[in-house]
Image (cartoon, rainbow, N blue to C red):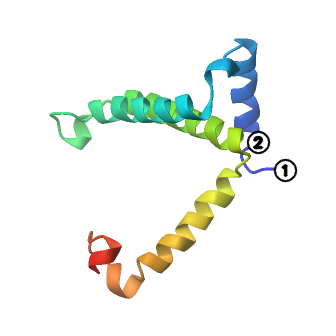
Amino acid sequence: MKENEEIIQALLKFRNERDWEQFHNPKDLALAISIESAELLELFLWKKAEDANTEKVKEELADIFSFAFLLAEKYGFDVKEIVLEKIKKNDLKYPVDKAKGTSKKYDEL
């Protein structure tokens, strides 16, 4: 069983009860992630990070995760697997001995 199956099943149930699958094509799910990400950014606009409303941050982050899980489900991706694969790729691009303590991009290391 997938690691995140409970979350995915709850999202699918919620979506299907409302007949929203028709709106949840990959393009629109990707757009929704971007829009929700912008709403998350807006919570930090013109203020210090510690001044952002953490409840609203939590809500926007949940929206982002929800649409990301739905997009992964559309493609049959296992979220745990793809994240761990990406960490491995980044480990090769950002070796500790070159990347530790710096924010430089991999091609500048």
Residue nearer the viewer, 8 or 106: 106
Q: Is residue 104 visible?
A: yes
Which amino acid type corresponds to the residue marked 2 in the rendered image?
Glu
Quadrant in which residue 71 is drawn: top right
**For residue 1, which numbered disc appears in the image?**
1
Which amino acid type corresponds to the residue marked 1 in the rendered image?
Met
Q: Percent from the top left, x then y, of residue 63?
A: 51, 30
Q: Label 1: how many residues lie within 10 Å, few (<14), some (14-19) or many (20+)? A: few
In the image: residue 47, left or right of residue 93: left
Quadrant in which residue 55 is drawn: top left
Residue nearer the viewer, 77 or 6: 77
**For residue 5, which numbered disc appears in the image?**
2
Q: Percent from the top left, x then y, of residue 95?
A: 42, 82
Q: Percent from the top left, x then y, of residue 45?
A: 20, 33
- In three-dimensional space, the C-alpha distance between marks 1 and 2, rounded to whole angstroms, equals 7 Å
Residue nearer the viewer, 53 or 17: 17
Cβ atoms under marks 1 and 2 closer than 8 Å: yes
